[in-house]
C-alpha cells in the first residue's frame, strides 16, 4: 500500500489500525486469488476441467482441446473483469459514504449508476456505431458523470451543497433515469429485451478489449481518487470541522463526487448497472480498517473485488433451470444463467435492511 | 470597545460585523480578542453569540464588517489560509464510527499538508504533540466514539490544536458534559492559553464559567454588544437584570477572588 | 442551543404584541375559502382548455354543449372526440390528482415525515412486480382485477419501507429505504422476465404495456375501474382527519390522548395505498404530486389542520396533474410525453425547495 509509505516508521509500527489494515489487505488478496482460481476450473453446466488442464488450455498456443481453451479463457476474462469492476465500485462507495456522512450511501444513491446505464442503453440501441467498444466508457462517463454533476448543480441551487440535498436529488434523478431506461428498452422491443440482463449488471460481455479499456480508465482516475481522499476524510467529520480545518466545503464535495462518479461510470458502462457493491464492501472492512479513507478505500476495493467474484461464481453455477428441474417445472424456466448483478442485489438488499435497522 | 484595550498584534479583531442566516442577527458588532488572553462571548439565548463566532471564523458570510487576524483581513485569505490562523471547534460535533483519535487529529493538518494529503514528519510531530497536550496519549489508537464525553471533547480539541494556529475559537465547549468534565475542559483551555500564549475566543453559556476562565467578557444582547471588558467591570446586577432577566448578587469567589454570580429570582417582567 | 435555533427564537422575543387569537382563526378560514375557490376556478378553466384544444381545436360552446348534454352521444366526430377521448382523460387526471394530493397529507402527517411520497416508497415498483408475475405466470396469482393487484404490490413495497424506517423521523432514512426497496422490486421484476421461456413471451409484452402506462389509453372503462376506489377511499381519508391531527402531535401525545398510534399508522398507510395504487395501473407512476401538493396547500392556507390541508391539497393535486397532462399532450404535439415525466420535471425541482427549507430549519 503506497498510501502508508509516508508515515514515519516508528508511528506506523505503533499504530495497530495500520497493522490490522495491512493484514486485511494481505488476506483479502489471498482470498481473491483463491476464489479466482477456484472459479477458473469449477463450472457446472459447461466444461469441467482439472487445474492442470486449465493451465495447459490457457498457455498452450496450439491447444488440441479447443473447447476447453475457449471455456478457460472466457472464465479468466470474467474473473479479471469482476476484480476490476468490484474494486472500482467499492472504492466509489467508500468515498461516497464519507461524503454523505451516511453509511447507507452508494453509487446508486447518487444517480450515477442509472445515468451511465441510460446513456449506454441509448447508445447501444440508437448509436451510430454500436460495434466499437472503446466509446462505451466515454458514453457511460458522459451519462454518469453528467448525472453526478447535475446532482451537484441542483443541490447547489440553494447555496450550500449539503448531504441531505445531495441524497434527495440523487435519488430523484436516479428514479427518473431508471424509468427512462425502462421506457427506452420497452420502445425498442426485441433488442431492448436482450439488454435487460445488462441493465442489472452482467459479466457475460467481458472481453480482453473491455478489460484493457476499464484498466486504462481506472488508471486515469487514480490521481483524482488520491486527491479526493483527504477531502473525503475531512468532510466525514462534518461541514464545520472540515471548513475549520481549511477545506473549501463545496469544492471538496465536488471533487469527491467527481472521483466516485468517474470510476462508477467507467465500470457501469462496460458491465451494466451492477449495484450494492459500493454499499456492502466498505462495511465489511470498516470495522477493521477504520473509517479513514487512506485505509478504507484500498481495502474496500479488494473486498468489492472478492464480492463480485463470489457473486459471479454463484451466477454461473446456480442456474434457475437447475433449480426448476429439481422442482419438476423445468419447461417453465428459460435455460439462461441469471446476470451477476441479480445475485449481488439478492445479497445486498438484506444487508441494506440490516444496516438500516442498526443505524440511528 | 473600551478605549484602554491594549494594541492588537496577534489577536483577532472584528469591526462593524453584520451577519445572519436569512436575516441579519448581528448588527454592527465590534470585537477584540487580545493576543494571549481568553475572551468569552456571553449573552442570553438568541443573542447571536454563536453566530458571531462563526462570522469571525469565516464559516458564515458577513453582510458587512471585517475580521482581521494578526492584522490580516480574513476575507482576502483562502479557507486553507484561514485554517492556519484560526482553529474552530464547533458545538457538539458528531463523531463518525470507527475513527481513532489519531485519525481524527490528523485531519487538523489538512491546511498544512501537500495536495494529496501526505503527512510529513512535522505533521506527525504536530499530531503527536496535540494528542499529548490534551492528555490522550494512551487513547491515541482508540476509537473516538468509544471514549467518554470528556475524553471525546478533548480529542476534538486536539484536532483544533493540531492546526497550530495563534487563535483558538470554541463554541460552547462544555455542552453535553457533566460538571467535572466541564471544568476539566475549561482548565485545559486555560492552561493551553497560559503555556502556549494562545489567543482564545469562546462562547460560553454559563456566566460563572465565563467569569472564572476568561480575562475579558463580551456581552451580547439581540445581536449587539452591550458590555465588554474585565469580568468584574462587566458583570453588574443591572446587567444581569436587564440582559439576562435575573435578580442576582455578585460576590467574590472566596478562593480565586473572581466574580461569582448567585441568582435569587427571575427579574420581574418590565425591568428586563 | 445552536446558532440556528438562536436565530429562530429572536422573532417572538422581540416582544411584539401577538395578534388576537380569534382574528387569526377568522383570517385562516378566509384564506381556506379563497385558496379552494381559486384552485377550483383554475381547475375548471384548465378542464375547458383541455376539452377544446388539440387536433382539431373546438370552440368553447361545442365543448360546453357536449359536456352538459345528457343522453346518447351524437354521431359526429366532435362529440366522440370530446366525450369519449378527452373527457375521460381529463376526469382521470382530476381523480388521480386529488387522490394523490389527499394521500400525500395522510402519509406525511402519519409518518411525521415531510418527504413521504408514494414514488419514494417504491409503490410503483412493488405494483410492477406483482403485475409482472400476474401477466407472465397467471396460474401463480389469483385472478384479480389489475387495480387490486397493484394495491397488493404497492402496499407490500410501501409496508417494507415503513417497517424499515419505522419510528424514524429522519427524512433521509425513509428516502434511502424507499430507493433500495424500489431497486429490489425492479430487480425481482427483471428476474421474472429473464427466467421466462420464449413460450410465455406474450406475458412480457402485457407487462411492458402496464409499465409504460399513460393517459393515452384512458377510456370510460378505466374510469370505471378506479371510481369505486375513489368513492370508497376519499371519504375515509377525510374522515380520518382527526386521527391524523392527533398523530402529527407525536406518538406519546397521541397515545396519552387515547389513540393507538401503531394501529392508526398501519390503517392510514393502507388507506393511502388505496388512494394511490389504482391509478398506477391506469396511467403509470406519477411522482411528486403527493409530495408537493400538501406542502403548497399548507403554506397557501397557513394552517396544518389535517382536514383543511386535505381539501386544499386534493384540489392542488388535481390542478398539478391536469397541468402536467395538458403539457404532455399539447407541448410536443403530435408526440406525447408520459405525464409522469412532466410531473417529475415540473414538480421535481419544486420538491427541492422543500428540501432546502428542511436544511435550514434543522
Image (cartoon, coloured by chain):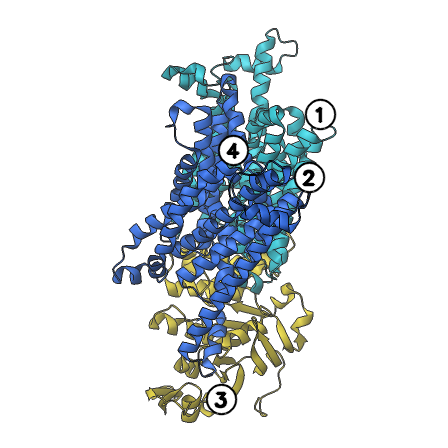
Pointer 2 local density, CA inside 10 Å: few below 14, some 14–19, many at least 20: few
Q: Are marks 4 and 1 on the same chain?
A: no
Q: Which residue is mark 3?
A: B230
Q: Which residue is mark 4?
A: C210
Across and down, in percent, residue C234 comes to 40, 50
Q: Report helix, strand or loop for mark 2.
A: loop
Q: Colour of chain A?
A: cyan
Say which chain is blue.
Answer: C
- Which image quadrant for residue A177? top right
Question: Which residue corresponds to the image point at 44% horizontal and 28% vertical from the top-left?
Answer: C133
Q: Earlier in the sequence, mark 2 or mark 4?
A: 4
Say if mark 2 contacts mark 3, CB within 8 Å: no
Disc 4 secondary structure class: helix
Both marks 1 and 2 on one chain: no
* Nearer the camera: disc 4 or disc 1: 4
- Disc 3 is placed on an element classified as loop
Q: CA distance from mark 1 to mark 2?
A: 33 Å
Q: Return the chain for callout 3.
A: B
Q: Residues within 10 Å of mark 1 (few under 14, many from 20)?
A: few
How much space separates mark 4 and mark 1, taking CA atoms?
A: 32 Å
Q: Nearer the viewer, residue A16 or A68?
A: A68
The subunit carrying tag 4 is: C
Q: On the rendered structure, is C8 left or right of A360? A: right
Q: Which chain is yellow?
A: B
Q: Are marks 2 and 4 on the same chain?
A: yes
- The quadrant of the image that shows the N terminus of chain C is bottom left
Q: What is the quadrant of residue B142 in the picture?
A: bottom left
Q: Name the residue nearer the viewer: A269 or C341.
A: C341
Amino acid at each position: 500500500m503506497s498510501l502508508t509509505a509516508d508515515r514515519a516508521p516508528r508511528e506506523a509500527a505503533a499504530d495497530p489500525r495500520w497493522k490490522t489494515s495491512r493484514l486485511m489487505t494481505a488476506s483479502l488478496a489471498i482470498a481473491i486469488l483463491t476464489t479466482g482460481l477456484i472459479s477458473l476450473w469449477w463450472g457446472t453446466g459447461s466444461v469441467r476441467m482439472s487445474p492442470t488442464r486449465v493451465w495447459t488450455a490457457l498457455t498452450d498456443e496450439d491447444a488440441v482441446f479447443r473447447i476447453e481453451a475457449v471455456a478457460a479463457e472466457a472464465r479468466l476474462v470474467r474473473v479479471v473483469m469482476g476484480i476490476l469492476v468490484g474494486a472500482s465500485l467499492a472504492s466509489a462507495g467508500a468515498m461516497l459514504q464519507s461524503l454523505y456522512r451516511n453509511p447507507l450511501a452508494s453509487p446508486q444513491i447518487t444517480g450515477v449508476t442509472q445515468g451511465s446505464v441510460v446513456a449506454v442503453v441509448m447508445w447501444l440501441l440508437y448509436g451510430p456505431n454500436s460495434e466499437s467498444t472503446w466509446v462505451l466508457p466515454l458514453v457511460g462517463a458522459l451519462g454518469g458523470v453528467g448525472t453526478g454533476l447535475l446532482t451537484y448543480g441542483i443541490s447547489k441551487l440553494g447555496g450550500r451543497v449539503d448531504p441531505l440535498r445531495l441524497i434527495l436529488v440523487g435519488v430523484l434523478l436516479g428514479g427518473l433515469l431508471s424509468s427512462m431506461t425502462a421506457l427506452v428498452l420497452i420502445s425498442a422491443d426485441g433488442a431492448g429485451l436482450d439488454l435487460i440482463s445488462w441493465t442489472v449488471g452482467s459479466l457475460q460481455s467481458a472481453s480482453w478489449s473491455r478489460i484493457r479499456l476499464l484498466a486504462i480508465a481506472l488508471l486515469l482516475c487514480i490521481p483524482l481518487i488520491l486527491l479526493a481522499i483527504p477531502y473525503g476524510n475531512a468532510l466525514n467529520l462534518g461541514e464545520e470541522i472540515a471548513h475549520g480545518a481549511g477545506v473549501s466545503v463545496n469544492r471538496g464535495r465536488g471533487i469527491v463526487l467527481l472521483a466516485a462518479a468517474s470510476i462508477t461510470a467507467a465500470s457501469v458502462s462496460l458491465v451494466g448497472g451492477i449495484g450494492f457493491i459500493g454499499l456492502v464492501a466498505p462495511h465489511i472492512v470498516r470495522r477493521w480498517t477504520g473509517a479513514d479513507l487512506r485505509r478504507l478505500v484500498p481495502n474496500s476495493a479488494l473486498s468489492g473485488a472478492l464480492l463480485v467474484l463470489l457473486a459471479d461464481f454463484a451466477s454461473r453455477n446456480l442456474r434457475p433451470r437447475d433449480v426448476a428441474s429439481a422442482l419438476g417445472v423445468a419447461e417453465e424456466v428459460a435455460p439462461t444463467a441469471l446476470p451477476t448483478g441479480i445475485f449481488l442485489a439478492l445479497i445486498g438488499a438484506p444487508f441494506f435492511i440490516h444496516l438500516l435497522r442498526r443505524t440511528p | 470597545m473600551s478605549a484602554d484595550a491594549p494594541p492588537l498584534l496577534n489577536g483577532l479583531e472584528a469591526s462593524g460585523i453584520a451577519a445572519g442566516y436569512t436575516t441579519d442577527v448581528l448588527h454592527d458588532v465590534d470585537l477584540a480578542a487580545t493576543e494571549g488572553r481568553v475572551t468569552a462571548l456571553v449573552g442570553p439565548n438568541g443573542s447571536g453569540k454563536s453566530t458571531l463566532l462563526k462570522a469571525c471564523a469565516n464559516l458564515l458570510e458577513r453582510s458587512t464588517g471585517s475580521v482581521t487576524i494578526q492584522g490580516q483581513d480574513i476575507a482576502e485569505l483562502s479557507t486553507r489560509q484561514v485554517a492556519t490562523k484560526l482553529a474552530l471547534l464547533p458545538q457538539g460535533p458528531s463523531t463518525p464510527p470507527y475513527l481513532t483519535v489519531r485519525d481524527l487529529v490528523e485531519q487538523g493538518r489538512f491546511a498544512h499538508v501537500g495536495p494529496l494529503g501526505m503527512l510529513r514528519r512535522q505533521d506527525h510531530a504536530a499530531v503527536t504533540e496535540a494528542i499529548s497536550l490534551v492528555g490522550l496519549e494512551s487513547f491515541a489508537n482508540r476509537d473516538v466514539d468509544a471514549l467518554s464525553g470528556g475524553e471525546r471533547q478533548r480529542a476534538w480539541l486536539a484536532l483544533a490544536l493540531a492546526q497550530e494556529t495563534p487563535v483558538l475559537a470554541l463554541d460552547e465547549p462544555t455542552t453535553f458534559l457533566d460538571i467535572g468534565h466541564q471544568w476539566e475542559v475549561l482548565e485545559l483551555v486555560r492552561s493551553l492559553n497560559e503555556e502556549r500564549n494562545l489567543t482564545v475566543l469562546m462562547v460560553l453559556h454559563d456566566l460563572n464559567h465565563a467569569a472564572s476562565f476568561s480575562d475579558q467578557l463580551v456581552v451580547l444582547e439581540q445581536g449587539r454588544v452591550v458590555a465588554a471588558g474585565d469580568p468584574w467591570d462587566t458583570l453588574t446586577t443591572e446587567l444581569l437584570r436587564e440582559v439576562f432577566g435575573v435578580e442576582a448578587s455578585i460576590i467574590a469567589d472566596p478562593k480565586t477572588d473572581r466574580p461569582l454570580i448567585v441568582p435569587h429570582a427571575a427579574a420581574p417582567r418590565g425591568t428586563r | 442551543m445552536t446558532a440556528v435555533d438562536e436565530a429562530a427564537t429572536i422573532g417572538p422575543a422581540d416582544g411584539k404584541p401577538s395578534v388576537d387569537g380569534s382574528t387569526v382563526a377568522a383570517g385562516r378560514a378566509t384564506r381556506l375559502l379563497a385558496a379552494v375557490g381559486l384552485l377550483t376556478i383554475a381547475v375548471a378553466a384548465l378542464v375547458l382548455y383541455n376539452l377544446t384544444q388539440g387536433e382539431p381545436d373546438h370552440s368553447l360552446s361545442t365543448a360546453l354543449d357536449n359536456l352538459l348534454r345528457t343522453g346518447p352521444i351524437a354521431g359526429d366526430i366532435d362529440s366522440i372526440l370530446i366525450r369519449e377521448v378527452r373527457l375521460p382523460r381529463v376526469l382521470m387526471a382530476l381523480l388521480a390528482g386529488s387522490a394523490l394530493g389527499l394521500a400525500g397529507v395522510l402519509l406525511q402527517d402519519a409518518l411525521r415525515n415531510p418527504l413521504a411520497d408514494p414514488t419514494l416508497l417504491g409503490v410503483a415498483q412493488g405494483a410492477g412486480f406483482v403485475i409482472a408475475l400476474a401477466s407472465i405466470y397467471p396460474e401463480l396469482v389469483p385472478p384479480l382485477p389489475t387495480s387490486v393487484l397493484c394495491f397488493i404490490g404497492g402496499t407490500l413495497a410501501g409496508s417494507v419501507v415503513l417497517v424499515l424506517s419505522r419510528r424514524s423521523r429522519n427524512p433521509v432514512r425513509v428516502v434511502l429505504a424507499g430507493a433500495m426497496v424500489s431497486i429490489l422490486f425492479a430487480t425481482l421484476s427483471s428476474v421474472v422476465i429473464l427466467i421466462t421461456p420464449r413460450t410465455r413471451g406474450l406475458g412480457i409484452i402485457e407487462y411492458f404495456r402496464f409499465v409504460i402506462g399513460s393517459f393515452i389509453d384512458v377510456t370510460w372503462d378505466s374510469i370505471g375501474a378506479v371510481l369505486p376506489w375513489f368513492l370508497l377511499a376519499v371519504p375515509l381519508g377525510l374522515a380520518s382527519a382527526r386521527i391524523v391531527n392527533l398523530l402529527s402531535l407525536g406518538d406519546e401525545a397521541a397515545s396519552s390522548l387515547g389513540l393507538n398510534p401503531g394501529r392508526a399508522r398501519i390503517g392510514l398507510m393502507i388507506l393511502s395505498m388505496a388512494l394511490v395504487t389504482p391509478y398506477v395501473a391506469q396511467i403509470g407512476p406519477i411522482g411528486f404530486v403527493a409530495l408537493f401538493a400538501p406542502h403548497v396547500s399548507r403554506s397557501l392556507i397557513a394552517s396544518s389542520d389535517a382536514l383543511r390541508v386535505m381539501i386544499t391539497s386534493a384540489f392542488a393535486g388535481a390542478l398539478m396533474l391536469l397541468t402536467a397532462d395538458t403539457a404532455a399532450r399539447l407541448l410536443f404535439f403530435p408526440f406525447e410525453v408520459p405525464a409522469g415525466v412532466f410531473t417529475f420535471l415540473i414538480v421535481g425541482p419544486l420538491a427541492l425547495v422543500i428540501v432546502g427549507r428542511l436544511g435550514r430549519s434543522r
